[in-house]
Amino acid sequence: MPKSIRYSLTNWAVGALLVLNVCITIWHATNSFRRVRSAKKIEYTYSGNSIPLLHPVQSKLPPVAMTLQESTHYAWTDPSNATRDEYNSLFQYPALSFLGPNYRMTITSWYHNFHCIAQIRTALFNHNDEVANPHHFAHCLQYLRQFLLCGSSEMLEEGDFMEKDFSADRVGSDLICQDWEYAFDALAAEEAKFREWYANGQVDV
C-alpha cells in the first residue's frame, strides 16, 4: 500500500476517534446535566420516606480549613468531671433537623457520630454502663467504620503517622472541611422556628 494512502487512512482513523471522543463527552455531559435538573425538580412531602438524602444546607456550606492536632482534652481514661463535661458537650451540638411544612424531624448523621464517640469512651471507661453496652459499642464501631468509608476523604497527610511521636509532634496536616458553624446555625434556626410553630399549636393531629 502506498505511503500516502496509509497516512490518509491513519489520519482518517485518528480524526474519527477524536470525533467519537467528543461525541461521547458531550453525551455524558448532557446526561449529567439532565440528572442534575431532574434532581432539582424533585419535590418532597417530608412525610413517610419522602425526605431528601442530604440536608438542603449541604450545598451552601462554604469550605473551611482545620489543622489536625493532638489535645489534652477528650481523654479516654480520665475520670475527672472536666473530661466528663467535655464529652457531654458533644450532645449540645444541634442533633435534629426540622424540615417541611409540618417540620418533619430527622437526626443528623454528624450527631450520630458524636454520640458514638461518647458511647465508645463510656464503654471503655465503664464496662458496666447500661447504655454503652457491648451491643451499643459494636454498633458504634460499625457505624463509624461505614461512615468514614462513605466519606472517602482524599486529603493528603505528610509523613508516616505510625512513626510519629505524638507527644512531640502535636500538629498535623491541614484538612479542607465544610463550615460546621454555618451548619450548626442553620439547624439552630430550624429548631427555633419549630418551637415557635409548636408553641402556637399548629401541629396536625
Image (cartoon, rainbow, N blue to C red):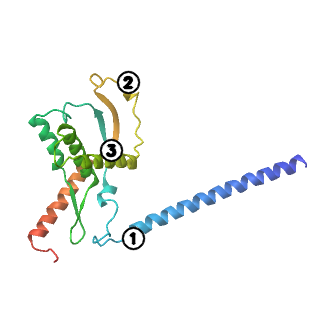
Which element type, helix, strand or loop, lies under badge 3? Answer: strand
Identify the residue at horizontal 32%, vertical 49% (top origin): 143
Q: Residue at x 47, y 65 (%)?
A: 35
Element carrying mark 2: helix
Marks 1 and 3 sit apart, C-alpha to C-alpha, by: 28 Å
Answer yes or no: do the residues labelled 3 and 2 have beta carbons within 8 Å?
A: no
Question: Which amino acid type is marked by label 2?
Answer: Glu
Q: Tell me the number on the disc at residue 163.
A: 2
Sequence-first tag of 1 and 3: 1
Name the mark on residue 41.
1
Question: Considering only vertical position in the picture, is 64 above or below 159?
Answer: below
Q: Position of residue 120 (x, y in %)?
A: 24, 42
Work out whether 160 lies above or below 31.
above
Q: CB atoms at circles 1 and 2 under 8 Å apart?
A: no
Q: Is residue 42 left or right of residue 8?
A: left
| Left or right relative to 96: residue 178 | right
Task: Residue type at mark 1: give it.
Answer: Lys
